[in-house]
């Protein structure tokens, strides 16, 4: 019997029917000791356990994205693969706008991932599901090294992904986009906490919700300061990205970024309008109980 569809992930999202733990543990035996039965007697993992979450991601990437080597240093962001895949699929729809029955999949398409992270997740999904080429920028040297290792040790990625280190943290696009570059789009999962204090407080609330033992203050999905914290939060980061995008309008067709807080949208729209950017779209996404979105803009 076919499993009921796990709505409302994107129709092309490979994870819309949930996780097949039999297949996942077959291709990644390390995961097996962490598989448990949940309250309704279905196989799952303890999502409050960072190691279990990391191994689940590793198994998903092996099973669905032809990845042979994937590892990230302890404490770095370990993203939820299904929600990251949704961003890629909705971006494909945006790039294919006006011709929905012919999803764009071409070796000539290049995407800039702003903040590739240690996990290299967006280039993995985009290159394997659509054949796109990626440039991934990263400001954290250790994360840059980890992402570069993932690219180096996976033949499916070695000719599809290029990592570039951002040596000046004052800039987002400057120093990354070269004069010879041409991108169909940028993608970005910006740091959304305005300070480490706010990040720690939110983390403690999340741990309480997950019923972790008292005294444990680690994020099950991890995350270093450069991944989670930016002075002023995501709204300041995105406003800076919008300002810099004006310098590279000849190099990028669509600039896009996730916006975790809906209340930040009016400020973002105001910044776009102030700079005379009228071609703006907001793409809403839903993963289970979570609402997310990304904003896209382009220059005429």
Image (spheres, grey):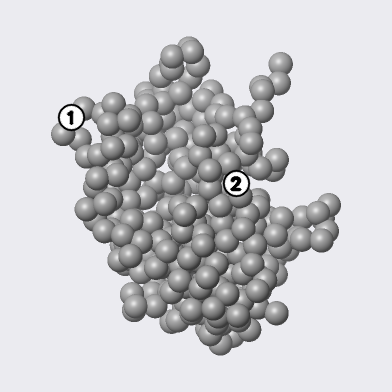
| Mark 2 / mark 1, whichever is N-terminal | 1
Local packing at callout 2 (Cα closer than 10 Å; few below 14, some 14-19, many 20+) is some
Which residue, given by chain and number where applicable, does mark 1 sit on? Answer: 214
Quarter of the figure with residue 116: bottom left
Looking at the image, residue 300 sits to the left or right of residue 195; the answer is right
Coordinates of residue 29 in the picture (x, y in percent): 44, 29
**Which residue lies at the image location 53% right of the left edge and 43% below the top edge?**
291
Coordinates of residue 238 in the picture (x, y in percent): 46, 67
Coordinates of residue 196 in the picture (x, y in percent): 24, 56
Which residue, given by chain and number where applicable, does mark 2 sit on? Answer: 285
Image position of 39 with respect to 225: above or below: above
For the residues labelled 2 and 1, the Cα–Cα distance comes to 34 Å
Coordinates of residue 246 in the picture (x, y in percent): 55, 82
Residue 27 visible, this angle: no
**Which residue lies at the image location 65% right of the left edge and 62% below the top edge?**
281
**Which residue lies at the image location 65% right of the left edge and 52% below the top edge?**
90
Looking at the image, residue 298 sits to the left or right of residue 38; the answer is right
């Amino acid at each position: 019997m076919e499993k009921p569809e796990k709505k409302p992930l994107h129709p092309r999202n490979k994870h819309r029917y949930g996780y097949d733990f039999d297949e996942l543990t077959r291709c990644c035996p390390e995961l097996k000791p962490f598989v448990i039965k949940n309250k309704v007697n279905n196989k799952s993992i303890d999502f409050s356990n960072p190691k279990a979450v990391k191994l689940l991601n590793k198994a998903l990437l092996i099973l669905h994205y032809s990845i042979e080597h994937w590892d990230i240093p302890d404490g770095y962001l370990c993203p939820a693969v299904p929600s990251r895949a949704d961003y890629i699929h909705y971006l494909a729809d945006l790039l294919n706008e006006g011709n929905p029955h012919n999803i764009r999949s071409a070796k000539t398409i290049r995407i800039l991932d702003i903040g590739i992270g240690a996990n290299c997740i967006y280039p993995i999904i985009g290159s394997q599901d659509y054949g796109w080429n990626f440039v991934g920028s990263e400001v954290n040297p250790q994360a840059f090294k980890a992402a570069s290792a993932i690219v180096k040790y996976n033949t499916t990625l070695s000719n599809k992904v290029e990592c570039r280190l951002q040596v000046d943290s004052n800039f987002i696009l400057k120093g990354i986009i070269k004069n010879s570059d041409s991108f169909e789009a940028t993608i970005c999962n910006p740091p959304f906490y305005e300070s480490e204090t706010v990040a720690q407080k939110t983390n403690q609330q999340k741990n309480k919700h997950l019923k972790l033992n008292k005294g444990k203050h680690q994020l099950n999905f991890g995350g270093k300061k450069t991944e989670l914290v930016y002075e002023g939060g995501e709204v300041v980061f995105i406003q800076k990205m919008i300002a810099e995008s004006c310098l590279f309008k000849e190099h990028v067709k669509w600039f896009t970024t996730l916006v975790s807080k809906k209340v930040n949208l009016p400020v973002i729209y105001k910044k776009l309008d102030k700079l005379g950017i009228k071609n703006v779209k907001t793409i809403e996404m839903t993963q289970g109980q979570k609402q997310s979105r990304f904003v896209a803009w382009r220059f005429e």
